[in-house]
Image: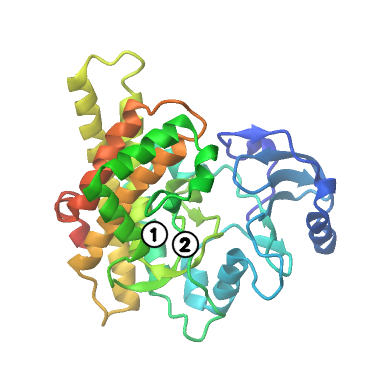
C-alpha cells in the first residue's frame, strides 16, 4: 500500500529469526511466480505462529508473505483469511470502512498470502507503550469494528464459525495429553484457574456457552498488535486467520482487555527494577487503568456510532456490555497462560492482571460503569 519502501524502514518487530529456507515451501514459490513480483531477496522471518517472511524483491516490491500452517489443505474448505477477503470483495460498505494491507496474491485455498508491506506503521500496541496511541484513532478503530460486526452476511460467501478462543484449552477438563508440553509457570497458572471454583466456572461458561448476545462476523483474535497505525493516524487491521461468525462481544472484549493489559504493564514497567514498595505498585496499576479507560471509552463511542448507523433498529444493551467485560477479563487469563509459556515462575505483573481478569469475569457490571461501556448502549 502506497509507495514501496526499503524493508529496513519498515516497523521493527519484537522478534526476528533466521529465515526458514523458502525452497522448502513449494506453494509459496508457486504463488510468487504466478504473481510475477520477482524473487525475494534476503528475506527476514518475523515472529508468529505461522512461517512468514518480509523482503524486497528483485522487481522492487516490498512484500510480506505468510504461510498458514493451520489452514486446511483440502480445497473444499479455504482458510478463514480467504473467506474474509472474499467477503471484503463482495461488500462495498466493508471495503470502504475496513483497511487491510493490500493483498497482492493468494493461493487457491488461502494458505499462502502475499501482501504489500505497510511502511513505517507500528502496531497499536507499540504506540500505546510509547504513549502515542491517540484516543481519536481508537474512535476510528471502533468505527471499523462496528461496521464489521453489523455486516449482513446472508447473501455473502459462506462464513463459518470463528476459530477457538485463545487458551481455551485451559477451561473445562484439561486434556492430560497436553500437560507434558506445558511449562512450570503454565502449570501454576492452571492451578490458579482451576483452584478458584467461581473463576473457573465463569470462564468455562463464557468460552463454552456465551450469553445470547448479538452474533455476527468477527475478527476472532482482535488485539492491539493486530492493528497497524501510520504517522497520519490511518489504521490497518491484519491477521484474519480466526475470522468467522460468533458473539461479537468477543472481539471488543479481547481488544479492550488488551488495552487494559498493555496499559497496566507499561505503567508497571515505568517503575523500573526497584519500585518503592506496594504503594508505588498499586499507584502504577491505577495509572495504567486510567490510561486504558480513556482509550476504551473512545473505542466504544466509535463502535456505537458505526453500529447505530448500520443497524439503527437493533440497539445494544447492558447484557451485551457485560459480555464484553467478561471477555476482557478472560483476556487477562489468556495473557497469563501465554506469557507463562517456557518460563518457570509467574511474574508479579501477570498475577496482578489475573486478579483484574477475575474481577471482570465475576463482576462485569462494575466494569461497565468504571469504563463507561454503556457508551455502546446509549
Residue indicated by mark 1: 251
Q: CA distance from mark 2 to mark 1?
A: 7 Å
Q: Position of residue 189 (x, y in %)?
A: 37, 37
Give left or right: position of 212 versus 3.
left
Give left or right: position of 80 versus 25.
left
Residue indicated by mark 2: 219
- Quick one: which residue is furthest to the bottom in this view? 155
| Mark 2 surroundings within 10 Å by alpha-carbon count, few (fewer than 14), some (14 through 19), many (20 or more) | many
Q: Are the residues tagged 2 and 1 within 8 Å (C-beta)?
A: yes
- Quick one: which residue is furthest to the front in this view? 176
Work out which quarter of the rendered image holds the N terminus and state it.
bottom right
Mark 2 or 1, nearer chain start: 2
Q: Secondary structure at mark 1?
A: helix
Q: Position of residue 165 (x, y in %)?
A: 44, 56
Q: Position of residue 248 (x, y in %)?
A: 36, 66
23 vs 311: above or below: above
Amino acid at each position: 500500500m502506497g509507495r514501496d519502501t526499503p524493508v529496513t524502514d519498515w516497523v521493527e518487530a519484537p522478534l526476528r529469526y533466521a529465515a526458514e529456507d523458502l525452497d522448502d515451501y513449494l506453494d509459496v514459490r508457486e504463488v510468487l511466480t504466478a504473481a510475477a513480483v520477482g524473487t525475494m531477496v534476503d528475506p527476514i522471518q518475523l515472529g508468529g505462529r505461522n512461517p512468514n517472511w518480509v523482503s524486497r524483491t528483485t522487481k522492487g516490491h516490498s512484500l510480506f508473505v505468510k504461510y498458514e500452517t493451520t489452514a486446511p489443505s483440502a480445497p473444499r474448505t479455504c482458510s478463514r483469511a480467504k473467506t474474509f477477503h472474499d467477503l471484503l470483495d463482495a461488500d462495498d460498505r466493508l471495503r470502504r470502512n475496513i483497511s487491510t494491507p493490500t493483498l497482492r496474491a493468494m493461493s487457491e485455498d488461502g494458505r499462502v498470502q502475499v501482501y504489500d508491506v505497510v511502511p513505517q506503521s507500528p502496531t497499536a500496541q507499540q504506540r500505546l507503550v510509547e504513549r502515542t496511541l491517540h484516543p481519536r484513532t481508537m474512535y476510528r478503530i471502533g468505527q471499523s469494528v462496528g461496521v464489521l460486526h453489523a455486516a449482513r452476511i446472508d447473501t455473502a460467501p459462506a462464513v463459518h464459525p470463528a476459530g477457538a478462543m485463545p487458551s481455551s484449552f485451559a477451561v473445562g477438563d484439561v486434556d492430560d495429553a497436553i500437560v507434558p508440553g506445558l511449562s512450570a509457570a503454565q502449570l501454576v497458572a492452571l492451578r490458579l484457574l482451576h483452584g478458584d471454583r467461581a473463576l473457573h466456572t465463569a470462564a468455562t461458561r463464557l468460552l463454552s456457552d456465551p450469553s445470547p448476545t448479538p452474533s455476527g462476523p468477527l475478527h476472532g483474535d482482535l488485539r492491539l498488535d493486530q492493528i497497524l497505525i501510520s504517522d497520519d493516524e490511518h489504521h490497518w487491521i491484519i491477521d484474519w486467520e480466526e475470522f468467522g461468525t460468533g458473539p461479537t462481544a468477543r472481539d471488543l472484549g479481547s481488544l479492550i482487555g488488551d488495552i487494559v493489559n498493555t496499559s497496566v504493564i507499561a505503567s508497571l514497567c515505568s517503575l523500573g527494577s526497584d519500585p518503592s514498595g506496594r504503594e508505588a505498585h498499586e499507584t502504577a496499576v491505577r495509572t495504567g487503568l486510567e490510561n486504558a479507560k480513556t482509550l476504551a471509552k473512545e473505542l466504544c463511542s466509535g463502535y456505537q456510532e458505526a453500529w447505530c448507523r448500520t443497524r439503527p433498529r437493533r440497539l445494544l444493551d447492558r447484557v451485551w456490555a457485560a459480555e464484553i467485560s467478561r471477555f476482557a477479563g478472560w483476556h487477562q487469563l489468556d495473557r497469563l497462560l501465554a506469557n507463562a509459556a517456557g518460563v518457570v515462575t509467574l511474574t508479579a505483573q501477570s498475577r496482578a492482571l489475573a486478579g483484574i481478569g477475575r474481577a471482570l469475569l465475576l463482576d462485569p457490571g462494575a466494569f461497565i460503569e468504571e469504563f463507561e461501556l454503556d457508551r455502546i448502549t446509549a
